[in-house]
Amino acid sequence: MKLSNATGKVTKVARRILKLKYCGAVIVAAGSASRMGGIDKVMANLGGEPMIVRTVRAFQNCDAIQEIVVVTRPDLMQSIMGLCRNFSKVTAIVAGGKDRPESVELGLNALSAKVKLAAIQDGARPLVTDAVIDRAVRAAHSYGAAAPAIPVKDTIKTVQGGVVINTPDRSTLQAVQTPQVFDFDILRGALKKARQEKTAITDDCSAVENMGFSVKIVEGDERNIKITTPMDLKIAQMLLEEMQ
């Protein structure tokens, strides 16, 4: 931006831009893929390359991310190392734990001491965009905890014993995606507390919520689907073709 001073000379005024905190990503790809009908979704072919490669590349190419740790199954460690050898931000490949919360903790432990924000990403969300990652990181920088989400389209029912007991107001419901991004110390403390108290958590946000912290919701993307079944993989292939 240029401004004229009292002498009439044009001067440049540097705009101050908020520098983001150093953010490390933990990509969790350690699941058993029990609903994939025998397909190993981590290595499943998506657009001519393993799905995990597309997930890692999204974070490699995002300026808001400084380093990446991939958490995977022990039997895939060597394969993942080979696939990630050209991604400069990948600093570690580690074996996952007995469940997702433990796998996330192991990933956090592998991040460097420079990390102030931790972005937790499902390895099975290979179509995540740079815009979604950036929005979540920037919101976490300001609020300490953030996650992308999209409005729920279907009417949701609470069911017990095969009988509807409640119909939540759809206008208040959002489907949360990843990356879920947090202040590093807050997330690590929340996961430790959940483990010690044996609290069941469905995602990383729920662990932080259990500590009494609020999570800022940012705009997600309908294409940022989680591949859980063979049908999801087919849908992802169609979406990828549209995005290219």
Image (tube, helix red, strand yellow):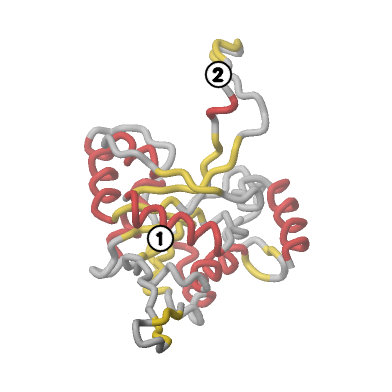
Residue at horizontal 39%, vertical 61%?
A: 95
Q: Are marks 2 and 1 in contact (CB under 8 Å)?
A: no
- The image shows a total of numbered marks equal to 2
Q: Tell me the tag on residue 158.
A: 2
| Residue 124 at x, y percent in the picture | 56, 54
Element type at mark 1: strand
Q: Amino acid at mark 1?
A: Val
Residue at horizontal 49%, vertical 65%?
A: 76
Q: Label 1 belongs to which residue?
A: 26
Q: Tell me the tag on residue 228.
A: none
| Residue 142 at x, y percent in the picture | 34, 54
Q: Nearest the camera: 194 or 239?
A: 239
Q: Nearest the camera: 64 or 104?
A: 64
Q: Is residue 57 left or right of residue 236?
A: left
Question: Around disc 2, counting alpha carbons within 10 Å, would you say few (fewer than 14), some (14 to 19), or many (20 or more)?
Answer: few
Question: Around disc 1, counting alpha carbons within 10 Å, would you say few (fewer than 14), some (14 to 19), or many (20 or more)?
Answer: many
* Image-quadrant location for residue 192: top left
Residue at horizontal 58%, vertical 61%?
A: 129
* Residue 214 position (above or below residue 16): above
The disc, 2 or 1, on the residue closer to the chain's N-terminal end is 1
Residue at horizontal 37%, vertical 74%?
A: 91
| Residue 15 at x, y percent in the picture | 39, 74
Q: Amino acid at mark 2?
A: Thr
- The quadrant of the rendering that contains the C terminus is bottom right
* Residue 38 position (above or below residue 1): above
